[in-house]
Image: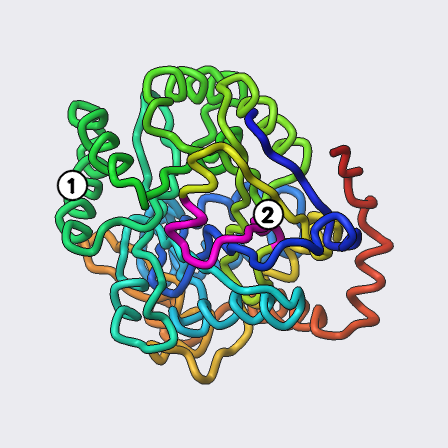
Amino acid sequence: MKDTRIHLESSPESWCHFTGAASIHSHTLCSRETLSFVNKLARGCGPLRVALQRGRAKYKEANGSELDLSRAWWTPPIAPYDAWQLERDQIQHRLGLHALVSMTDHDTIEAPMSLGTVLDCHDLPISVEWTVPFGPTFFHLGVHNIPAKSATELMDQMSALTRSRSTLHLRSLLEALSRPQESLVVFNHPCWDESGVGQQTHDEWAARFATEYGAYLHAFEINGLRRWAENRRALQMARDFEKPVISGGDRHTLEPNAILDLTNASSFAEYVAQVRAGHTDVLIMRQYRDPFQLRILQGLHELMQTHKNHGRGWQHWSDRVFYRCDDGIVRSMSTLFANHVPVSVQIFVKGLSMMRHPSVRRTFRYAFSPGEELVL
């Protein structure tokens, strides 16, 4: 690991000399998010398990086939401008620093491209979280500040590689993405076995990927929605490959990024130059110290509440969950359930709504095991 320092929001004396902060890696309603995590989450959560079982039964009754969550996805509830504003405001109003924001939806640059004509967002970089197939698994790369003149063409090439699951042109594409001096390529959450191939297998292939393509990777990420034990492994991996570490908040709902980067750069290009030179400062925000389970429940609550001003009119959670049916047509859960969501699912959603009450949050905070110690 190069010259990387980690700071805590609760110790401002260590970071008060910085003039700005960067929010890297966050999502908007343009992202498609897999629902594969639901099966795993349901195994440890009785109410969710019952709701899922009833939902499967209701779907089979209505459609005559089994519900396959690998064909389903959800979209975050927040529009691009609102997402940008949420990240900017945390930095400006809570920390009193100049804000740099880069938003990275999954395999699409729709959000930053759509904000290109908005005066407030004139300096928003064109960025993406790119899904890269590799061996039996896949990895996510944060590709930031893609040159505008070639962004659409490069995104088309990235999407084609993802769909084909072929690495034939991976090296040349990574070289093209990393070549511009103002661009940044980050190995996002490198130790997360998201595909479920097994931790040891994932780690072996992650090390192989970093060995083969490390010349095109400018930094490794520690992630605001992953446990600290996993982030510690990412820190060690960065040391092994002599790469700097940067933040990746990975916000999907309404909690602003829990990990940021500190900087004295006045522009995103200057920040990129600092990272590429190997000098980084990571700031752990207070919300990261909350119990992991509490933060996940809070995120589920924010996802499943009604958003009356949703940017695409998808006010209810079932409007924002989609399924590719046997006939190949994509339908929302509202359509599939004919607007009659199973009672067990409604109860689960109402139960999550209790998370808005501070007393309930305090109860959950004490009920869950304390957050893992941050050993810096």
Q: At label 2, which amino acid type do we have? A: Gly
Residue 289 showing in the rendered view: yes
Say which of 140 and 6 sits in front.
6
Tell me which corner region of the image, top left, top right, bottom left or bottom right, holds residue 215.
Answer: top left
Is the residue 221 above or below the residue 312 in the image? above
Q: Give coordinates of residue 307: x percent, y percent.
A: 49, 79
Q: Is residue 208 left or right of residue 198?
A: left
Residue 53 visible, this angle: no
* Badge 1 or badge 2: first in the primary sequence: 1
- Label 1: which residue? 157
Q: Residues within 10 Å of mark 2 (few under 14, many from 20)?
A: many
Place of residue 177 in the rendered image (x, y in percent of width and height, measured from the top left)? 25, 38
> Does residue 340 sit above or below 132 in this rendering?
below
Q: CA distance from mark 1 to mark 2?
A: 29 Å
Where residue 18 appears, as percent x and y from the top left, is 63, 54
Q: Residue at x 41, y 45 (%)?
A: 272
Q: Nearer the viewer, residue 142 or 7?
A: 7
* Secondary structure of the residue carrying numbered label 1: helix
Q: Which residue is mark 2?
A: 224
Tell me where the magenta segment starts and ends, as one range. Answer: 258-272
Mark 1 Cα within 10 Å, few/some/many (few <14, many 20+)? Answer: some
Q: Is residue 186 left or right of residue 369?
A: left
Identify the residue at horizontal 59%, vertical 69% (top origin): 92
| Location of the C terminus (image quadrant) | top right
Residue at coordinates 63% horizontally, 72% vertically from top-left? 93
The residue lying at 66 percent from left, 56 percent from top is: 47
